[in-house]
Image (cartoon, rainbow, N blue to C red):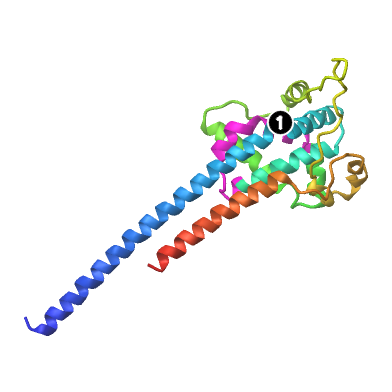
Amino acid sequence: MDWTEIAALGSVGAAGAALTAALIAWRVGRDQVRSTVVANGVNLAIQLRAHVNSAEFRAARHNAAGALLAGRYSSDVVYVLDELETIGLLVRRRVVDAEIVWTMISALVVNYVAAARPYIDADRRRNPTLWANLLDLEERMLAVERKQGGTDLDASTTYPSYLEMEVREMAPLQAAGANGAPNGAPSEAPSEAVSSLARFPARAAAASSSPRSAGAPNRLRAAAWRAASSSWAASAASAASWAWR
């Protein structure tokens, strides 16, 4: 074997070693990206849970449930559905895990969608893109329910009792007055955005009577997109760093 053959074998060995090192680096980088995405998803799920159980959203659910039971499509109904629409988008984009969301708000999703179905269908006849993420979220919640062996698969007959429970349990706490007697609870949730009202001009007049301003920032959407952006940015940065190694 002459030096040319030895050099060629050495080059092949070096190339093989470089390829192996690149594969190892890629796998480690991929695992780091996955860990970052999972961590951000868990943090976002914690934020979503806190928002869903916040005083302002509980008050909105209380008002929305009462409106749906009375056959009204109020600004509170639009607000609750719009927040669920945002969560649906995050689940569809895999920013947060569907099973985690199922453990937190599955009943909320399927019952409110069932109760508001006539209004949702009317909106979608006018514009088929409306509530697409909300309906996708409903399907995903039902899919997880089936996978887990659950039986709550049809809320078309159960949503009235669920809404009645929402009216009772989500009622805003009454503050005590100067004489110790409770003051009247506010009829509306604290000021919060109903960003989707811009898509519902026919109901803008009804929304204008609510203290919730359509121009105010949507806190859930802002927090969600901050977490999503952080997740995607971390993924891109980690991938890029390994690509240059």
**Looking at the image, is 13 positioned above or below residue 47?**
below
Q: Is residue 97 visible?
A: no
Above/below status of 51 relative to 9 = above
Q: Looking at the figure, which quarter contains the N terminus?
A: bottom left
Residue 76 placement (x, y as % from top left): 82, 37
Under mark 1, the amino acid is: Asn
Is 103 contained in the magenta span? yes
Secondary structure beneath label 1: helix
Q: Position of residue 54 (x, y in %)?
A: 70, 33
For the C terminus, the quadrant is: bottom left
In the image, 156 versus 183, the foreground residue is 183
Is 73 in front, or is 208? 208
Q: Is residue 32 visible?
A: yes
Residue position for label 1 = 111
Determine whether 177 is above or below 138 in the image.
above
Is 109 left or right of 213, judged from the image as shown? left
